Image: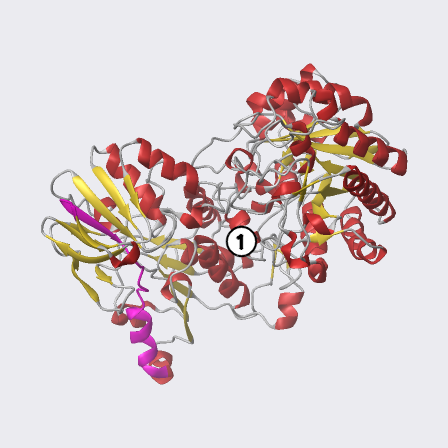
């Protein structure tokens, strides 16, 4: 097994002078940030008994060069809890001691640490404690995905108690060592509920005029300022955008900011309420990088205090231009730093091309609601403490470096190959039957609006080109005999999981009559996009048993081609898994607006020559006229090669020089993009590394300042 010799790419050793402005120190009240990178708060889903994971995770952000690292959301009142997303709390001195480790970890790398104190108000659901949510009026919150609770209207005692708890939490945050206390007054949380007439129907001194509605927040800020004095900086997470009936109109938001500016050291700007969270999380399918800036820029009309802006920013030229123009003082980022904690240091070292750019899939939001922070780009996210992983440090290569054959150039195979080459493996061949790398992402990124997801492949393809140990062999489908003759000592089978060409029923796990993609009126996603199969006629039924975004994205592609589309799914929502990513509701609206039909809670019974037989609520059977049917039912692991290899036995494999055979990613079981990449990374990190070597992982393959 041989490889063509490559010349290692020269690595830039210094930053572009145009980016110098990003590394200027900035005063924030009594504190000074070392640069203009501000890691904004986000919930990870880790509980108070998992604080060590927060410590390692936030410490990694500081090590990566973020000058300010805000942890949050931190809850300080039982009434603000929500069981769908457990997280950090600051209610007792014991909580204070636990959270102090986060501040210490951030300080260890010269960054400022902040604690964001949040109260969800009507958006909470504290039924786990058998107490009501609290709100300015007994109006249901606007984010029914988060909470369906009907809150208690706060009386004056409730208001005073919540304010005193907020102030006490701020004092504890200071005593825990945090440099910044941030009051969360965005995203439709309690302060915004007081500010907006949508929520606030009070007739006392906390309702009516805008000044009255701002009173609750003003009193919180006054109390916090008095409690912490000049020892810490006071930040406010604040909404400037006014989209949706439950939001605060932009002009009102600016007027309130002018009222409160004397109490605030820095404004951390946000968008979106609980009902319009897509405007805050700005998934790349819906919004381009920098989308929020059109509103953030207006904050300069009312303040000269430092302003933090978040807009999924990854382009250093755009970042520098925003600072130079005076639009922002800090480049805020949650998702860009989840994807690459070392973004600031890579830009500083002139290595912008090595940044793992956020793809805007919002898998981080989805996974945090399940209790574990993950990322489609960065497999080490959330594993800093649990596995001791570092995004830039890998175990050294073994003393005897084996040659490696990776069969399949999809996300998992690419991650395995690039991680091995970063470790110093000098003979890694990636072989694929396709003409280019990418696996299923080759076609998925061609669906309407999903091009940014291609960054997952582009980043790893660039690494394959950069490192001298890697070789990509396209247009080659390997058989078992081919693998035996290849000469590799380690074989990794990463052949993915294409969509099944025969539809199987959820009802009995038996084939659905007529659901056969060999027929001219039935197709799979790969057949439509990669093979160019054309369905007859103009009407199409898509049967979606994935429940994610594949089917709805295919529907939009077919609508763009002039076809009438109906999506049938057994789930309660079409693309329901996309609700947490903040794309589901918007995509459903787009499909309907384009003339499509959504049919949830319905199963496919049969495909006929002229339609689909379905059964809905109450087992009511009907026939939908359709010229063609697309099967998005389930993916099936393409594991035949792996099974054939292992069936040969270790003796036969050894005769061919093969020491180990592994399978990875979707070839094991169909999974998410994030988990497929994670699996490839874990395998490559562990191969040939002892537990001691893994613990002593060193910086290899990535040079940062």
Spot occupied by residue 546 in the image (x, y as percentages of width and height): 35, 55
Q: Residue at x 52, y 63 (%)?
A: 682
Q: Residue furthest bottom?
A: 651
Query: How has the structure been colored for display?
Result: secondary structure
Q: Residue furthest front?
A: 203
Q: Is residue 443 visible?
A: no
Q: Is 632 above or below relative to 301?
A: below
Decide which of 125, 29 is in the foreground and name it. 125
Q: Position of residue 151 (x, y in %)?
A: 64, 44
Position of 699 compared to 459: left or right? right
Q: Would you say residue 212 is visible in this rendering?
A: yes
> Quadrant location of the C terminus?
top right
Q: Quadrant of residue 189?
A: top right
Farthest left residue? 609
Could you say whether the residue bearing mark 1 is in a helix, strand or loop?
Answer: helix
Taking 507 as reference, is 367 left or right? right
Task: Judge whether residue 643 is colored magenta.
Answer: yes
* Image coords of residue 640 (percent x, y): 28, 70
Label 1 crowd bin: few (<14), some (14–19), many (20+), radius 10 Å: some
- Is residue 163 within the magenta segment? no
The residue located at (80%, 28%) in the rendering is 27
Q: Quadrant of the N terminus?
A: bottom left
So how many labels did they put on this image? 1
Q: Which residues are magenta?
A: 624-649
**Coordinates of residue 598 in the picture (x, y in percent):** 30, 43
In the picture, measured across the screen, residue 653 lies left or right of residue 50, that is left
Check disc 1 and report the residue beneath it. Answer: 367
Left or right of 438? Residue 231 is right
């Amino acid at each position: 097994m041989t490889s063509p010799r490559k010349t290692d790419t020269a690595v830039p050793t210094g930053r572009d002078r145009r980016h110098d402005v990003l590394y200027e120190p900035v005063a924030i009240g009594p504190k000074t940030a070392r640069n203009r990178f501000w890691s904004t708060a986000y919930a990870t889903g880790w509980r108070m008994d998992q604080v060590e994971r927060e410590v390692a995770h936030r410490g990694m952000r500081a090590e990566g060069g973020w000058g300010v690292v805000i942890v949050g959301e931190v809850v300080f009142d039982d009434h603000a809890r929500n069981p769908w997303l457990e997280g950090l709390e600051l209610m007792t001195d014991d909580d204070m001691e636990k959270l102090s480790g986060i501040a210490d970890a951030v300080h260890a790398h010269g960054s400022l640490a902040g604690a964001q104190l949040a109260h969800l108000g009507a958006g909470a659901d504290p039924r786990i404690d058998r107490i009501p949510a609290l709100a300015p009026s007994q109006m249901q919150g606007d984010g029914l995905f988060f909470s369906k609770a009907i809150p208690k209207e706060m009386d004056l005692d409730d208001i005073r108690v919540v304010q005193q708890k907020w102030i006490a939490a701020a004092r504890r945050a200071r005593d825990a060592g945090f440099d910044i206390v941030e009051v969360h007054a965005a995203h439709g949380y309690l302060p915004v509920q007081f500010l907006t007439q949508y929520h606030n129907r009070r007739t006392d001194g906390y309702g009516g005029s805008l000044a009255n509605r701002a009173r609750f927040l003003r009193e919180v800020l006054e109390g916090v300022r008095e409690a912490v004095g000049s020892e810490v900086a006071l930040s406010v997470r604040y909404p400037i955008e006014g989209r949706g009936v439950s939001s605060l109109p932009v002009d009102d938001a600016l007027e309130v900011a002018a009222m409160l500016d004397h109490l605030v050291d820095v404004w951390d700007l946000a968008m979106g309420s609980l009902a319009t969270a897509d405007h805050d999380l700005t998934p790349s399918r819906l919004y381009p990088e920098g989308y929020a800036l059109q509103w953030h820029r207006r904050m300069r009309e009312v303040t000269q205090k430092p302003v933090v802006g978040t807009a999924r920013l990854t382009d250093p030229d755009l970042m520098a231009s925003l600072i130079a123009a005076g639009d922002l003082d800090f480049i805020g980022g949650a998702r860009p730093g989840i994807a690459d904690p070392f973004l600031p240091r890579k830009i500083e070292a002139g290595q912008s091309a090595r940044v793992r750019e956020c793809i805007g899939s919002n898998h981080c939001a989805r996974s945090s609601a399940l209790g574990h922070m993950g990322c489609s780009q960065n497999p080490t996210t959330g594993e800093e403490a649990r596995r001791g992983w570092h995004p830039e440090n890998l175990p050294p290569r073994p003393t005897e470096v084996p040659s490696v054959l990776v069969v399949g150039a999809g996300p998992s195979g690419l991650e395995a190959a690039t991680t091995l080459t970063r470790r110093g493996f000098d003979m890694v061949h990636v072989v694929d039957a396709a003409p280019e790398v990418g696996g299923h992402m080759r076609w998925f990124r061609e669906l309407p609006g999903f091009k940014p997801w291609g960054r997952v492949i582009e980043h790893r393809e660039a690494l394959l080109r950069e490192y001298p140990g890697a070789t990509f062999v396209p247009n080659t489908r390997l058989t078992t005999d081919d693998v035996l003759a290849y000469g590799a000592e380690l074989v990794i089978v990463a052949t993915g999981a294409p969509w099944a060409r025969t539809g199987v029923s959820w009802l009995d796990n038996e084939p659905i009559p007529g659901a056969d993609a060999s027929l001219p009126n039935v197709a799979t996603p790969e057949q439509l996009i990669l093979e160019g199969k054309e369905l007859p006629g103009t009407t199409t039924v898509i049967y979606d048993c994935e429940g994610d975004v594949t089917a709805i994205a295919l529907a939009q592609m077919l609508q763009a081609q002039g076809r009438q589309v109906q999506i049938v799914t057994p789930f309660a929502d079409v693309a329901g898994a996309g609700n947490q990513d903040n794309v589901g509701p918007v995509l459903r609206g787009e499909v309907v607006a384009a003339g499509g039909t959504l049919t949830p809670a319905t199963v496919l019974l049969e495909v006929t020559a002229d339609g689909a037989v379905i059964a809905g609520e109450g087992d009511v059977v009907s026939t939908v006229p359709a010229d063609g049917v697309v099967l998005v039912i389930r993916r099936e692991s393409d594991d035949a090669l792996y099974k054939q290899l292992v069936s040969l036995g270790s003796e036969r494999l050894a005769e061919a020089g093969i020491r180990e055979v592994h399978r990875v990613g979707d070839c094991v079981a169909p999974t998410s993009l994030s988990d497929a990449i994670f699996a490839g990374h874990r395998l490559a990190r562990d191969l040939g590394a002892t537990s001691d070597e893994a613990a002593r992982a060193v910086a290899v393959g990535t040079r940062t300042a």
